[in-house]
Amino acid sequence: MADIINLRLARKTKLRAERVVKAAENRRKHGRSRSERTMDEAEKRLADSRLDGHQRSEAPEPLRDENEESCSEAFHRDRGS
């Protein structure tokens, strides 16, 4: 048979454990020197610029025949507008 547990206490215990993990992450994230933060920012900017450099240019519009109508032109022609 299963042990009886108090759900309120289990919820609070879980919440405390999550707070401990979050506090550890915050200490790691915010407990750095200025030089470490500026180095991370520079690395992030470099990675962003490299990613932007690899971005494809916009594709040209597809070629249409002179007699071909666009969808909006055909729609308005059919509606009589």
Image (cartoon, rainbow, N blue to C red):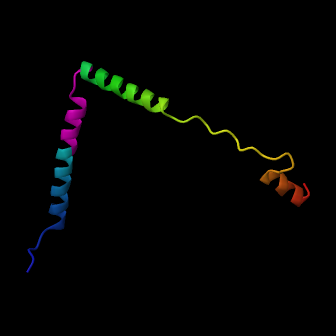
Q: Residue at x 25, y 18 (%)?
A: 35
Spot occupied by residue 31 in the image (x, y as percentages of width and height): 20, 28
- Give left or right: position of 41 versus 78: left
Question: Residue 61 appears in which quarter of the rendering?
Answer: top right
Spot occupied by residue 67 in the image (x, y as percentages of width and height): 87, 49
The quarter of the rendered structure image containing the C terminus is bottom right
Q: Residue at x 12, y 69 (%)?
A: 5
- Residue 64's place in the image compared with 74, above or below, is above
- Residue 51's place in the image compared with 37, above or below, is below
- Identify which residue, 71 or 79, lies in the foreground: 71
Number of numbered labels in the structure image: 0
In the image, residue 29 lies in the stretch drawn in magenta: yes
Question: Residue 4 appears in which quarter of the rendering?
Answer: bottom left
Q: Which residues are magenta?
A: 22-34
The quarter of the rendered structure image containing the N terminus is bottom left
- Identify which residue, 48 or 59, lies in the foreground: 59
Q: Residue at x 44, y 27 (%)?
A: 49
In the image, residue 13 lies in the stretch drawn in magenta: no
- Residue 69's place in the image compared with 26, above or below, is below
